[in-house]
Structures are given as structure tokens and as C-alpha cells.
Amino acid sequence: MGEIKENVPLPKTKPSTEQDVTDELDLRMKKYLRGEGANLEGLKDKKLKGQLAAKEDLYGKSAKAAAKAEKWLMPSEGGYLEAEGLEKTWRIKQEAIAHEVDISSSRKQYDIILPELGPYTLDFTSSGRYMAVSGRKGHLGIVDMINLSIIREFQVRETVRDVAFLHNELFFAAAQKKYPYIYNREGTELHCLKEHGPVLRLQFLENHFLLASINKFGQLRYQDVTMGSMVGNFRTGLGRTNVMQVNPFNGVVSLGHSGGTVTMWKPTSASPLVKMLCHHGPVSALAFHSNGLLMATAGKDKKIKLWDLRKFEVLQTLPGHANTLDFSQKGLLACGNGSLIQILRDVSGTQNYSKYMTHSMVKGYQIGKLVFRPYEDVLGIGHSMGWSSILTPGAGEPNFDSWVANPFETSKQRREKEIRSLLDKLPPETIMLDPSKIGTVKPRRERPTKQEREAEIEAGVEAAKGMKLKKKTKGRNKPGKRVQKKQEAVSRVKRPYLEQKIQEEESISRKKQKTSEDVELPKSLQRFARKKASS
């Protein structure tokens, strides 16, 4: 018999005080607050001031509740590849990663080979559970990523260039040879969108229920999928392009053009909001960070650039070429070119990206599209011979919010979520570069009083009279000319005040004239009224 050891008492740890808990909650709250609070000091409307103060208080309470939920109900933490000593993370192969992870994670690494129907493009739902695949030769399908089972696949027998899910997995749009089509989950054709023409790329704006498309003639169109109406139809004027991406932060659609420019559009403006020269050659790929402040572009000049969208300045320039780019939820950047994939990571948190992982496909496979799967450490790859999936540790958000995206939602939860999202649907006018301006109050500029205006005029006149004139040569320095110059300076000072006074008098006379025209005169006086000019 072995010797029985007595129970060793656990080390006593100092319990966290209430102050420590509140400090931790305050730090977590900053992540959930909706920016800085509105400045209510300049408001004179007491009712509006009270309403805004109540809303700010509500925002603070919701941020505190979210911080508490994160502390106690979100225990999962994201992980990354870590190298020891002189080892590099980008040298670690997929075989070594699959050997270390659990069985359920190793199942997420696969290759589907369909050489007769490729190349393939992919799209995931916002929850990451369902994936839509489309082959260029007309193959369309929906895959359940949890069970790895095909829900429906069918053949449309014509070219398919792109595919995009709508608000959930029940509907998806496919850009076919002549027109884009909308299908349901069972593969039934619901709509043929003939107004869009031969579309090259599709994007869906979830918060606005808008389907955006760019066709081969360079026309950008927005269609409301709830009402079926065309919201915007604009000719870009910059030629054909197949580079299109939506900024998830503000809903602005960005296009990359053959002249090296990137344009940003919204459905209520016929001209681009921003037009920036990004490369000295055609733009080949475009991607946005989930925070909306970082944009990655790749060009044919063999450069990958990271842009700060607050200043529209280059943060970093990396050598290399990419036909497709994509940001993960945690900020990893995937670049695909030929049969090589590079994944970059911001290690220091200062927007300085470096090589994190690499993966080589089988020689001859041409990568068409890279898409990170939401809430999973998985990268989906659409290539010329089918589609594949590789493990990328640290890519997905480890904790999902069931009110935003629930991979395990039931049909009842899906119906309720669809109704809520339709009720919360945002109008197209809310799409702008800085959506934080919505709901802010513009302070009223108070006009100066008559006394203040007269004091300003007097101060300006005194300054003009007291100005020193240069002494000039004989004949040009006469007292009469000096007086004339001072009078001209005084008149220059008075001119803007006089013009403003004349404008005010004209506006008052116009108002009086309008009111007098609105009042119907008796018949005996109508002949004295001013007659309108005949058109």
C-alpha cells in the first residue's frame, strides 16, 4: 500500500474588492459604448434635452449589461499560433495543425474536387452555418457546415459568375450569364432581375435589405429586396470592373477600377462619395476590416496597401500580388494569388501587418476567392478545381451573440429574427461615410445683436483710420491722396456689413410681398395690386 498523504490546504487568494470589479466593468464598457455622448450644454430646448439625456442614460445601461454578460457568460477566448525559439509560425503546415486539434476541428479541413464545374466562388451566412457555392459552369448548392451535408444542389446550365446570400439562408442570389436570379433554399427560381443586366459581382447590405450589383458595362445598381423597387442606378464612367466590396461599418459600396482608383458609393448619390488613387495599375482586390476604419487593396503593380479611412492615408505597403483579399472577424488578412495563400496578422496592434501563415494549394489550382467563415477559425477557398477549407487559428470571434447571429437557431428563432430585422430595416439615406453623425444635434448659431454689430463696425473703422501709410516718392505722398486711401480703407471695412443689411431688408420686403399676395384683396382694390409677370 502506498503512503496516504494528507490533504494540502489550498493557497489563500485575496478576494477581489468591489472597486476592482467596478474598474474592470468600466474598462469593458468602453467597448460597448456608442462613441462619445452628445454635448447637451448648447441645447436650449428643454424637452429635446431631456429626451437625449434619457437616451444617453439608456445607452450607458445597455453597455453595462453587455459588459456584465461578457464577464460572466463569455468564457471562450481566441487563440493564435505560437512559435518557440527560432521557429516561425508561417512554416507550420496544415498537417501539423490538424494533428494537434480535436476531431471536430480536424473535420473542418477538407478538399472538394469538382474540376469539370469550376472555378468556384463561395459565400457564408452571417452566422457562418451555411455556405453557398457556385461553379462557373452552372453548379449551385447550399451546404450545412455543422453537419457537412449538402442541403440542395442543382444545375442552371449557364455561366454563373458570383453568388450571395440575402438576409438568411432561405434566399440567395446568383449572377448568371444574362441576368441575376434569386432562388430559395429548395432551388426554386423566385425572381429574374432583368434591370441589372449581365452582372459580374453581387453584394448584399444586411441592415438595409439592398442587393447591390455591378455589371459588365460599369453600371452600379441597388435593389430593395423587400419591396422590389430599384433604389439607385448609376453609371460609374470608369469602365468594366469585377472588384466590389461593402464596408460592414457604414454600408458604403467600394469599387476598384482599371485606372488604379477606388470609388465609394451610396444609393442616394449619383457621384462617388470618395475617389482615391490607390495604385499605379488596375486594382485587383479589395477588403474591409470589420471596424470599417481599415481598407486593404491589391493592384497589378505588385503592391498590397493598407489604408486608414479616417485620413485616407497609406498605413503600410507590402510587396506582393493578390487576386482576392479578405479580413477575418479578429483582423487577420488573407491574400490569395495563383496557388499560394498568405495570411497576415497585426501582432502589435499598431496596424503593422506581418506574415502569420502560408498555405500552398496543389500545383495548377488557381485561387478564385477567399472567405473567412464567421465565428470559426476556418478559411474557405474557392479555386479552379473545386473548393477547400483550411484551419486558421485566431481568425473567428470565439463568442457569438445569439441576438445577432446564432449558428444553432431554430426555425422559430429564424422567423422572429427575420421580423425584427425587417422592423429595424434602415432607409438608404442612412448610408454615409460617417454614420456616427446620425442623431447628433447641430448647435444653433446665434446672430449678433444690433449693438454688437455696430461695435464691430466702429472698431473696424477706428483701425482703418489709424493705419500707417508708407512714405512714397515726391508727388505720390500728397495729403489729398493719403486721405483718399484712408477713406477707401474705411469703405472696405463697412462694405460687408452694408451688404448684409441690404440682404436682410430685401428678404423682409419679399416676405411682406408674399404675405400681401396671399391675402385676397376686395374687388375695389384688386386693380391697384401688383400684377405678376406673364410667363
Image (spheres, rainbow, N blue to C red):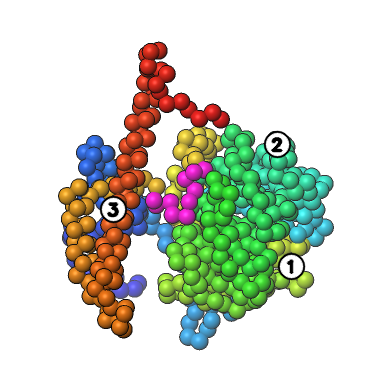
Q: Position of residue 420 (x, y in %)?
A: 47, 36
Residue drawn at point x = 28 percent, y = 78 percent: 477
- Is 254 displayed left or right of 403 in the figure? right
First along the sequence among labels 3 and 1: 1
Q: Is residue 290 visible?
A: yes
Q: Secondary structure at mark 3?
A: helix
Q: Amino acid at mark 2?
A: His
Q: Label 3 sits on what residue type?
A: Tyr
Compared with 145, 113 (above or below) is below
The residue wearing badge 2 is 191
Rendered-image quadrant of the C terminus? top right
Q: Residue 484 occupies which quadrant of the picture?
A: bottom left
Vertical comparison of 125 with 521: above or below:
below
Q: CA distance from mark 1 to mark 2?
A: 32 Å
| Dot placed on the residue nearer the N-terminal end, 1 or 2 | 2
- Looking at the image, residue 338 sits to the left or right of residue 310; the answer is right
Q: Position of residue 419 (x, y in %)?
A: 50, 34
Q: Residue furthest top?
A: 523
* Residue 91 shown left or right of residue 192 in the figure: left
Question: Circle 1 — which element?
Answer: loop
Query: Is mark 3 in CB contact (under 8 Å) with mark 1?
Result: no
- The spot of residue 298 in percent (x, y) is 61, 69
Amino acid type, label 1: Gln
The mark found on residue 366 in the picture is 1
Q: Which residue is mark 3?
A: 497
The crowd level at tag 1 (other Cα within 10 Å; few <14, some 14-19, many 20+) is many
Q: Which residues are magenta?
A: 428-437
| Name of the residue lying farthest toward the bottom | 86
**Does the image show residue 146?**
no
